[in-house]
Image (tube, helix red, strand yellow):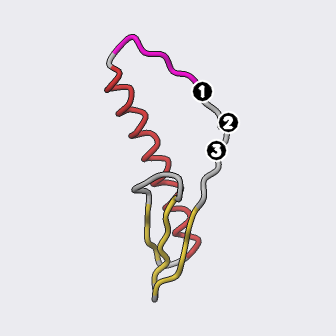
Amino acid sequence: MKNKYTAVTKQDGDWWVGWIAEIPGVNCQERTHESLLESLKVTLSEAIAFNKQDALSAASSGYREELVSL
């Protein structure tokens, strides 16, 4: 299943800055728009993996993983 997220980007002087609207804390800056989008993808992927591991650690044991769709 591929999820879709919204990248909010803008040029600020010589830099491109961007955020993933749906995930707090996922933001990057790069010299080019293309590099920014790639950095946002990598950072988003890492944030999702970290958040999942954090949730599993908090649950400890006896938990179930279930898909939730909006």
Instruction: Inspect the image, locate mark 2, and give the three-letter code of the amino acid beneath it.
Output: Met
Tag 2–tag 1 contact (CB < 8 Å):
yes
The quarter of the image holding the C terminus is top right
Q: Secondary structure at mark 2?
A: loop
Q: Residue at x 57, y 74 (%)?
A: 33
Q: Name the one closer to the observer, 14 or 23.
A: 23
Tag 3–tag 2 contact (CB < 8 Å):
yes
Left or right relative to 49: residue 3: right
Q: Which numbered disc, 1 or 3, marks the residue that appears first in the sequence?
A: 3
Instruction: Inspect the image, locate mark 3, and give the three-letter code of the amino acid beneath it.
Output: Asn
Residue picked out by circle 3: 3
Residue 39: x percent and y percent?
49, 62
Residue 8: x percent and y percent?
56, 67
Picture layout, residue 49 above or below residue 23 = above
Q: Secondary structure at mark 3?
A: loop
Please tell me how many numbered marks the rendered image carries: 3
Residue 63: x percent and y percent?
43, 15
Q: Residue at x 53, y 69 (%)?
A: 35
The outermost residue toward the top is 62
Label 3 vs label 2: CA separation?
6 Å
Q: Which residues are magenta?
A: 61-66
Label 2 vs label 1: CA separation?
11 Å
Q: Secondary structure at mark 1?
A: loop
Of marks 2 and 1, the one in the foreground:
1
The outermost residue toward the front is 70
Q: Residue at x 53, y 59 (%)?
A: 21
Instruction: Inspect the image, locate mark 1, and give the three-letter code of the amino acid beneath it.
Output: Leu
Residue 1: mark: 2
Residue picked out by circle 1: 67
Q: Tag 3: Cα neighbours inside 10 Å, few (<14), some, or many (≥20)?
A: few
Left or right relative to 48: residue 56: left
